[in-house]
Image (cartoon, helix red, strand yellow):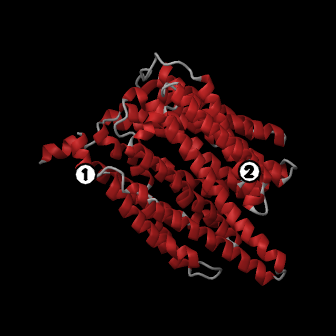
Amino acid sequence: MTKKVKQEKLPKELTRIAWILVIGAIPAMLDSTMVNIAINKLQLDLNTSLNMIQWAITGYTLALAAAVPITGYLMNHFDGKKIFAICVALFGAGSVLSGFAWNVDAFILSRMVQGFFGGILVTCLTTLLFAVTPKDKIGQLMAVVGTPMILGPILGPVIGGFIVQYLNWHWIFFVNIPIVIIAVILIWHYLPKMTPLNPTSKLDWIGTLILITFSSSFMYGIIKGSEATHFFESHGMWLFCGVSLICLVAYIIYDLLRKHNTVMPLKFFESRNFTAANIGIFLNGLAVNGAMLLLPLYFQNVRNFTVVEAGMILIPQGLGMLITRPLAGKFIDKVGARPVVLASIAVSLIGSVPLIWWGSSTNIWWIVLILFIRGLGIGGVFMPLMTDVYIGIEPKDVPGAGVANRMIQNVGSSFGSAVMSAIVTGIVLNYMTSHTSVNAANLAKITGYQTGFLVSCIALAVIAIPALFLTSKHQKSKIS
């Protein structure tokens, strides 16, 4: 019995690789959440409009999307260790440029540099881990890698809030530098050489350009929709989402003509696990990431919390996620992804449905308890979905599968944030056109956030449908 327990533990070498990769990805995972906190200060110091400074976020997101298809080629042809180290260093260089930005144009360009190399290194992290990890250890490894994914959204607003309030926005970027230096040293000296995964493959320029245009157009379209008074009345949204749809159809035809010999072979979607997991991941962007955007805004705009207070009140949710992650990793390897996702959704709904009735005077201790329960639940949703993406995928096909998965993550997250923003903005503007009193404005804000939380709960419940097609203990025994 003791021997069996020892065999189930992660090898030290594998754990070391995971933590080194995680340290390298921490700056990219913290960065975007810290920048969101500093928007008002950036607008003032760079002497620009809110719409213009929002391009720093939009440009980062679009560069992130453009980097994903290129990552597959880099991983196929070059030593993954060198690619990862170089991208971490160049992300650090982008951080320095962002910190020293002298005007808004320089700032936006620097952010795009960060977004491009951040997109490569985060995709690289996942691809490298799944390429070297035995399938029966994936759950435990995801528990390790999932830690910074949790800490980023939780610690980012807190750290960013303290920096903006007590220092200045420049240090949001300069704080990355020591982490980047330590990460590059660790990667170079302690990470083993990563053999190119498929050196005989060729760069699919046509497929890459189509995918970049598809994802960038879709993201830009929904950003334009979220900026409009009414989401579906934005001409920019229809135009760019139309371009995105044309690119999607073109890529499907192109992939069929090339017999799946493309940068992102669509043959992966013939796998039930791959398709179900990615549908769940897309819905997770609306259910979890969208609500993550609303929560700090609710505390600042409805409860009148300071930036630091809004970050601090989210800590119970983060603690719940931290407790769940390692447990979920162990259960995934024992019983499969399906029961873990379904159980996590049930707990998540217990901690999410009460948000629909949160108002301006909801008891603070009730809020703390609900956020903690919500954290326990959502901490177990994403990780098992990610593990099933790579079930049955050959090592040489991991980069292509990683491109598809990362692109769906990016599109889902952007879609979730844009929909939530459009819901809150649309409801507030509709109320204000017919009511001018202060009470009406407050009621509009509360109603907007409550509606957003309702949509989040619905999306969370819908994830249960694709979850039914994920692996179970019975299926895993067949696979092995």
Q: Nearer the viewer, mark 1 or mark 2?
A: 2
Give, as a three-letter code, the residue at label 1: Lys
Q: Which residue is mark 2?
A: 238
Residue 392 relative to residue 278: left or right:
left
- Please say if 456 is above or below 357: above
Q: Could you tell me which residue is drawn at 68 percent across and 66 percent down?
A: 423
Specify the quadrant that holds the C terminus. Answer: top left
* Count of number-bearing discs: 2
Q: Secondary structure at mark 1?
A: helix
Label at residue 397: none
Q: Secondary structure at mark 2?
A: helix
Image quadrant where residue 307 sits: bottom right
Q: Nearer the viewer, residue 154 or 403?
A: 403
Q: Which residue is mark 1?
A: 473
Image quadrant where residue 50 sits: bottom right
Q: Position of residue 454 (x, y in %)?
A: 57, 71
Q: Position of residue 44 (x, y in %)?
A: 84, 54
- Please say if 27 is above or below 208: below
- The residue positioned farthest toward the right in the image shown: 47
Decide: few, some or many residues near mark 1? Use Cα within 10 Å; few <14, some 14-19, many ≥20: some
- Please say if 355 is above or below 210: below
Q: Could you tell me which residue is drawn at 69 percent across and 53 percent down?
A: 36
Give, as a three-letter code, the residue at label 2: Trp
Q: Could you tell me which residue is drawn at 34 percent across and 46 percent down?
A: 139
Residue 45 relative to residue 471: left or right:
right
Image quadrant where residue 217 sits: top right
Q: Position of residue 414 (x, y in %)?
A: 63, 50
Residue 277 relative to residue 307: left or right:
left
Upstream in the sequence, badge 1 or badge 2? 2
